[in-house]
Image: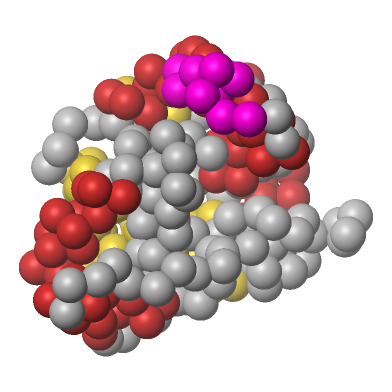
Amino acid sequence: MREKPVKGMKISEHIYLIGSGCMGLSPEGDCNVYALADGGDIYLVDCGFHEDPGGLLHNMEQDGLECANLRGVLLTHIHPDHAGAVPAFQKMGIPIMGCEESAQVLEQGIGAYYRLRERLPPSGFRDYFCNPVRGRVDRVLRPGERIAFGGCTVEMVPTPGHSPDSVCYLMRCGGKTHLFTGDTLFYQGQVSYFTNVLSCTDCYPRTIEALAALRPEGLYPGHLLFSVTRGWVSTERAKAYLDAGVLPPMKKYS
């Protein structure tokens, strides 16, 4: 494990990758953490599992992004690899944003909210999710609600499937659309879900239909590869599986 993080990755004028376990920007297993920047304002999509977010902030600074301009963290869902650093960011006074169900999960903890000790057999898997990420959502985002900064907007899109509280964020900037999908949808149209209460597989068809209708230029998942162009190829590939009567294939995302 790297003790001192390296510089992040500037993807485009307004999008930076500042954390990623699979790309060596942060510890193994960590999610992709994106920084969205314009007009002197910065928002993060997810924040990883860091007890100390110093590595993410270092990567931001190395990419020329001033931490003082950080306006909020947009959560895609409350799993430890995506939201573990929430308490640390809240101590810094950074607002946490997410959907209503994420707010409830974060307040109670995943294990308590979904009653995992009652509903799942003892296992390392259960223990991982029962080790609670606790905090609060400072701003609850409603479906379709937009955040404006500089010449960009980010819209919250509810996308239950990987988890009941999963959402995506659609960024419009410079005449292009960029979709940040968390663990809902991956490169080439693959998905990720559990065969228990932690996922909502019955919700996935409607979610995939909604994402395919967006036809994003860029697609930025919560792990592994992203697409700077032709992101709609992944959403349409996922929809093609649905049209054939099956869910898209599972992605190993860590």
Q: Is residue 166 above or below residue 26?
A: above
Q: Is residue 219 visible?
A: no
Depth check, front residue: 230 or 120: 120
Indicate whether 47 appears above or below 112: below
Q: Which corner quadrant of the image does residue 50 belong to?
A: top right
Where residue 176 appears, as percent x and y from the top left, is 19, 73
Classify 200 as above or below 220. Answer: above
Pick the residue in front: 221 or 252: 252
Q: Nearer the viewer, residue 8 or 187?
A: 187
Q: Residue at x 67, y 40 (%)?
A: 125
Q: Position of residue 31 (x, y in %)?
A: 59, 55
**Considering the image in quadrants, where does the C terminus appear?**
bottom right
For the point 63% across and 30% down, which residue is it? 121
Q: Which residues make up the magenta segment?
A: 113-121
Q: Is residue 22 visible?
A: yes
Q: Is residue 40 left or right of residue 176?
A: right
Could you tell me residue 169's position as x and y percent? 28, 52
**Quarter of the view holding residue 130:** top right
